[in-house]
Image (spheres, helix red, strand yellow):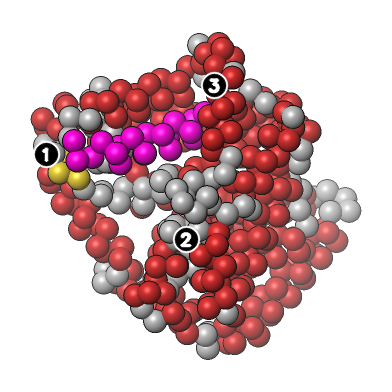
Amino acid sequence: MRSYLFLFILFDITFLPYFWALSIPFSMPFVFLWAFINIGKIYEYGNKEGKYPALIVFTIILSTIVGYQYDEYIYKNSVIAINFIYIFILWFYFSLNTKLLYRYDIVKLLSCFYTFVFLWALLFYFDKDTYVSLLGIWNARSAGTFSKLFEDISYFRFSFIWTDPNNISYVISSLLLFIFFTRTLSILKILILYLMAVFIVLMTMSAGGFITLALSTVIMLIDVFYRFVKSAGREGKLPIVGGSLIITLFGLLFLSYFGDLLMQNDTIIYSLSRFEDNLAGDGAGSGRVDILKKVIGLVGFEQLIASFFVGFGGITLVGGDSVSPHNGHIFWWLSFGVISYVIFIGYFFIRPFFRNIQYSLWLIPFILGFTINIMLGELKLFSLFMLMYTYSTHKMDKGSL
């Protein structure tokens, strides 16, 4: 039964649809049930290795209660709190079931998920009507589903089966680095994964996704160059390096041939145009900067003091009014307090780099996504993050899974 629940959660956060009525994972009630049954183990683990995540959960609950003073936001605050508590319970679940991380090939599962996303992107590219029809089954509240109602179908953005197109673009770059640094891959496989990532990000039309993928590319190239220098002097390694270079050259020729065909597609033309607009300061990226400046301008010294220990819940409130900062740092600080923010950033984004840089590089796209967008409101994305985080940190402890 334990293995069945584990596999159900894994497949649910990767492949299964959202529960359409509430837009939550099907496994969410079972995760809460597991927490209720194993409250003793969670409490014991929370007093040892899990004390910081447990403290974050405490600040979320306390901030939500404080936010109940604003009657009009009680329902939404409660929903957001339940969603975030579910995510941290998932961390406890994965951490208390590390033996199952050994038993099942998590990286292979994530590689299959990677391919699954690519297949959805292909469907989006070739047949948007069918894509939207299926998307209505997987996630009725997706941005893609609503876009069909309000604009030309050829120009809405690929969001996978999730809600926000930006989110999947960050996750794909993160998965690319995660697979690259946790598996020994041939250059051909790396090239295929990379081309798939480029295609997916183009379909999302995400400026943040382009930036994240570009940075991921630089990280991978530095690692490949390091390996080349390290192996160049070893006997028998030069033919392998030469073969890798030939495969890379073949990939570039492939891109140059099919690139012209891709550039004739309206979606890709619009995607690149949108990215250029963001670089020029005329697109959505510019709007986010303006919103961020406005929110920072509204947050005064009194708000800073008021949000130091706790916030006012998941509805970001400035002066009693709900605002959307489009920035994860400000969102967490105003919602759950500065102390909660410092613990969250320190434990999940900074601490792993001091333990093992190689197994932490996949976090960089998440950090950028958290900075450019809020990102963590996507339940399946945050669930994947907790799975990848638990896997990589235990890989640091054990050396190899």
- Which residue in the protein does label 3 denote? 36
As for residue 78 lying within the magenta part, the answer is yes
Of labels 2 and 3, earlier in sequence is 3
281, 318: nearer the viewer: 318
The kind of residue tagged 2 is Ala
Q: Is residue 104 visible?
A: yes
- Which residue in the protein does label 1 denote? 319
Residue found at the very far right of the displayed protein: 236
Closer to viewer: mark 3 or mark 1:
3
- Which residue in the protein does label 2 denote? 140
Which picture quadrant has residue 276? bottom left
- In the depicted structure, whether residue 397 falls above or below residue 40: below
Kindly report the secondary structure that dominates the magenta region of the rendered protein.
helix
Screen quadrant of the C terminus: top right
Q: Is residue 91 visible?
A: no
Measuring from the top left, give residue 254's x and y in whole percent. 69, 79
Closer to viewer: mark 2 or mark 1:
2
Q: Which disc, if any, is residue 275?
A: none
Disc 3 is placed on an element classified as helix
Of labels 2 and 1, earlier in sequence is 2
| Other-residue count near label 3 (Cα within 10 Å), few / some / many at <14 / 14–19 / ≥20 | few
Disc 1 is placed on an element classified as loop
Instruction: Report the span colored magenta.
Output: 71-89
Residue shown at 45%/48% (left/top)? 22
Measuring from the top left, give residue 267's x and y in whole percent. 48, 79
